[in-house]
Amino acid sequence: MGHPGAVLKPCADLLALCDCNNFFVSCERLFRPDLEGRPVVVLSSNDGVVISRSNEIKALGVKMGEPFFRVRSFLERHGAAVFSSNFRLYEEVSARVMASLRRFTPSMEVYSVDEAFLEIPPEGKKKPGEWALDVRAAVLRQTGIPVSVGAAPTKTAAKLAAERAKKRPETGGGFALLPGDPWEDLLGEVPVEDVWGIGRRWSDFLRRRGISTALRLRDAPDDRLEKYLGIRGLRTAWELRGIRCFPIEEREKPQKSIQSSRSFAVPVRDRESLAEAVTEFTLTAGRRLRSQNSLAGSLSVSISTSRFRGSFFGARAEVTLETPTDSDITLMRAAAGALSSIYREGHDYEKAEICLGSLSSAGTVQLRLFGKREDRGAALSRAADRLNGEAGRRLLLPAALLGEKEWHPRKDRHSGMGLEDLEKLPVISAEE
DNA sequence: TCTGGGGTCCTAGGACCC
DNA sequence: TCTGGGGTCCTAGGACCC
């Protein structure tokens, strides 16, 4: 014992993971009930790779992250519906799912756009399996999104429970994994690489040492785990023993860094286009910076050519800002300076990225340090946020960014749907 | 022709200070 | 010319996640 930082707390409490099934696909199906039962995929930016798959697609053997060009004709042959990603829609639907979940729990952590950990309330602890099914039914009724709910003493175990609920129709989409025999049985069936927190490198390493299942990971010696996988790996094993090491973190913490990047639809050679892209990404990051009420203390710009063709060139420059800021004008100026310090002619650039770092709270103290000019820039940026927010698109922007750009990511198969488009909503008759 | 975008945490090693 | 221990902070890189 004596592992500092690991919270040794016997599992009197139960928590649950609620995981939306095939989330992006399910969002697209909200507007296209005719796609129920049909193969559907959603593609990444630039229609590059498959990032969400319906069950029918999974059954056809199409993998997550598969480049679209490689499966395109295969998908056509099978009559699959293909969508470009529409993150604005997915975020709106996500907010509704989370609101629906909050009614079931005193404490909840939004873990990702399609997942949340919930503390199970006292009444749910008596029959956690039934409680899980209730949650699933309510979310489906209220939002139209199918979810899987797994209940267990720890997050790592709840992940396994939710996976079981998703994969086995007989569970009805809800499953409770409680210490005892079923616990051992299930852990024995789960490949070690399917455990939350065990990725490619670690599972290869573990398998080479005969640790091929979640059960074997649970029973591996602490000193070896800590030596080879570090504290995170050790905690994962403890969680499989039913000891809670990763608590539910209810309070939403502000992000510590904010990045914005895109691959270009076509290679970019000239400095001007690259500068446009960097400016656009800076505006995107700036808006998110202000929305979480932070100031950036540093900013970095990276540019690179394709990883897949020709000889690779990449460069990165980081600048420390004189004063932490949330002014687009200051950020854009810094980004332009960083870009010109790394730009080299003669390369086919495929991607640019900007990252805001050293974030601090835009609260009390720093504001007094601001000079007048900085104040104006920040105020202007916030006014733009307000206008653009109300319009639902970018109305106010630098002239250089007006119009369609060749490098803008392709979205040939965008559904164009949003929850605010009432006229576009399909009319369906549903039985409750 | 065509291969995503956005995060977090941990650790090792170097710089620097006493 | 050779030579110590210990602490802190920072950064880069690696691992993981969705």
Image (spheres, coloured by chain):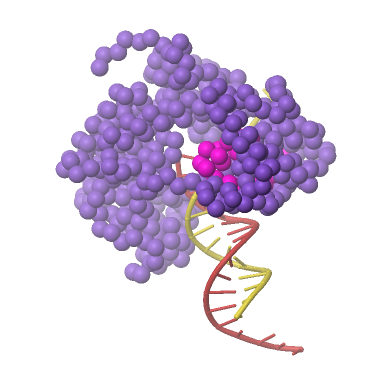
Chain colours: A purple, B yellow, C red
Q: Quadrant of residue A244?
A: bottom left
Left or right of A13? Residue A384 is right
Residue A18 vertical position relative to residue A322 in the rendered view, above or below: above
Left or right of A343? Residue A205 is left
Find residue A69 and report its horizontal and vertical position in percent: 61, 26
Seen from this angle, which residue lies furthest left? A126
Residue C8 vertical position relative to residue A103 in the rendered view, above or below: below
Q: Is residue A324 visible?
A: yes
Is A287 a magenta residue? yes
Residue A251 vertical position relative to residue A395 in the rendered view, above or below: below
The answer to which of B8 and A210 lies nearer the viewer is B8
Find residue A396 and report its horizontal and vertical position in percent: 64, 26
Q: Residue at x 80, y 35 (%)?
A: A271
Q: Which of the image's four quarters has the N terminus of chain A?
A: bottom left
Is A14 a magenta residue? no
- Numbered marks: total: 0
Left or right of A421? Residue A120 is left
The residue stretch that appears in magenta: A283-305
The answer to which of A303 and A242 lies nearer the viewer is A303
Find residue A367 and report its horizontal and vertical position in percent: 58, 48
